[in-house]
Image (spheres, rainbow, N blue to C red):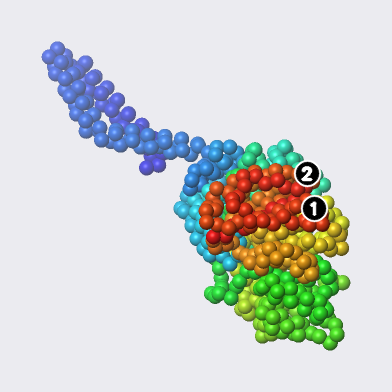
Amino acid sequence: MSHKLFLLEFIELTITLNSLFLVLSYSCIVSSHPLSRKNSYLCARNLYQSYLLHKMYQVKKILLLAWLFMLAAIAMAKPIRAVSPNGVLSLEQKGNGYVLNYKGQQVLNVSQVGITTSTVGEGLTFQRMVKRGKVKADYLMKEGKRLHPRNVANEYVCEYADQNGKPVHLVFRLYNDGVAFRYELSGLKGEQLKGEQTVYTIPDGTRRWMQRWSDGYEEFFPLTTSGGGRDKRLGFPSLLEPKDGVFVLLSEANIERRQSAASLYNDGKPEEYRVCPDKNEVALDGEWHTPWRIAMVGSLADVVESTLATDVSEPCKLADTSWIHAGVVSWVYWAYNHGSNDYNIIKKYVDFAATLHLPYVLIDAEWDQMKDGKTVVDAVNYAKSQGVKPMIWYNSSVGWVNGAPTPQYRLNKPEDREKEFAWCEEIGVAGVKIDFFSGDNQMNMDYCIDLLESAARHHLLINFHGAPIPRGWQRTYPNLLSTEGVYGAEWYNNVPTFTKRAAAHNATLPFTRNVIGPMDYTPCAFSDSQHPHITSHAHELALTVLFESGLQHLADRPESFLAQPKEVQQFLSELPAAWDDTRLVAGYPGEYAVMARRSGDTWYVAGINGSDEPRTIGINTDFIKTSKCSILSFADSGNSDAPWNISQVDHLPNSVACQPRGGFLYVIRR
């Protein structure tokens, strides 16, 4: 019954009862005989009571409806609220947006929402929020912080109508470790995406680590406490500390065809950060949705250990993944910019990989200009003869082209791409490194998907270099084992800036860039490139565990690695590039970081000091059972002539004293 019908019936019944009582009472008053008046009164009373009994069911029914109507009105007046499965996270409607609460405290203000195309989305009016049910993530990975991620979320849809009555849905998923949301549109007819109106309001004073946007995402993550600075465009991921000890990492995931990636613009009010999709000129028809906007929430450990970026991404699209294997790579560029056009230099890196039993070697740029009558096929055949799988480099030819390294324009057209990848498969190339993309636009996103799908058809692994950050493709296309999208060790080759900033930057990346996916930082150098490093030997070795990448490229020269103690060489020979589990042990962005990763029954605990001062780092590794285990410790000696302190220990300590810019590493084997 509608509230209008209920009111009419209630009024009608009230009038009927009152009228009946008045008529019967008047009849007894006008009667001339006293007895008649008495009988008339009794009759009126009995009739009235009988009528009341007769109508009692309807009265109860109406009163019940009134109660339900009142409860509905109260419920409609309450703020809209959604919760995570464990109840720790809650989402409430506030003004034109939503606020996210963690354990009852507001940690993220999505102060405005909206999406507009050429005809849809203007003048949104909220209709209702509906709970859709639970969404489970349970899948296998080929690389990552966890090979078998599991997660569960409560999913809600917020229904809006625009000024023309067209529906716009805002879908939220609340996980125990964060929230994901996206816009869903339907009934589109050649629409052009105009923009997104999502705004994160970050109050002044909030500690944040954000990088200035660049098309290759190769910038630092400086600590700041306010917006409105010179950097108007900022790249994902962005780390916030809205409350002491509570963190939020903002990013996005699940880029599909017909979509561009997004970044943050801080070009208006200092506290407002707008989510802005990059250029997208595709005509949108039928159903369409944005990528997921994600926020990992909780303690630093909750954020670092989260797999939310892949949890919300499309499942694996490859029928067969048995040929995909993560591994360590011998890499030429850090020491020799143009080394891959020299067959003899390539041989050195192949021999080094064979000596340390590394599975892969990368033949980098300019292999198509090899000297001394040799060709890349000769180099590929030599690698295979030594039991090392070769990978080769390509220019994407959409970013840096003029004056850039070759080979160029071999992958842009579908027919050329298929021909080139078929040739790679035929001669025994295991994978390709593709470099110099041009940002987050829809053309680049579709091109990357084209490359991933074509490479998979020819059983080729992929490393995207000079490219945007990973946004969940590593689940959908598991042949994508790494992506650069980071200011990494190759910058020792370019400018002097990295020397003094590397230690603090290294201690920031585990909490920012590497959280969202594999990171081709190219770690571990004991000698110097064009510009020196001042991080310690143990710091450099620890990076191979601290930083996760399905293809872990080792930066240093072969002779430098082969000059290290046999324990270091043995460690590199057995270094995993995919992990069964990952735990953050200790740390704070820019200051220090300690990570524990497990492969099979072996735990690796790696830590670094990001500061220029000595630091004692407390570590709690109670989750690692060390009984009947051998524990090998790598530490700094403090002596530049004999820099290593390598020993067998009988237990893991509660704290470790670190040198300035130093590090440590424990290998715990059963």
Residue linked to disc 2: 613
Question: Residue 572 appears at what percent x and percent y?
Answer: 68, 65
In percent of width and height, residue 633 lies at 66, 55
54 relative position to 391: left or right: left
Q: Secondary structure at mark 2?
A: loop
**Residue type marked 2:** Glu
Question: Is residue 160 depicted above or below 12 in this figure?
Answer: below
494 relative to 115 in the view: left or right? right
Which residue position holds label 1?
A: 639
Q: Earlier in the sequence, mark 1 or mark 2?
A: 2
Give the spatial CA distance, label 1 vs label 2.
Answer: 16 Å
Residue 340 x/y as whole percent: 80, 76
Q: In which quadrant of the rendered view does residue 642 lie?
A: bottom right
> Quarter of the image holding residue 202?
top right
The answer to whether 567 is drawn above or below residue 304 in the figure is: below
Query: Image quadrant of residue 285?
Result: bottom right
Q: Residue at x 33, y 33 (%)?
A: 63
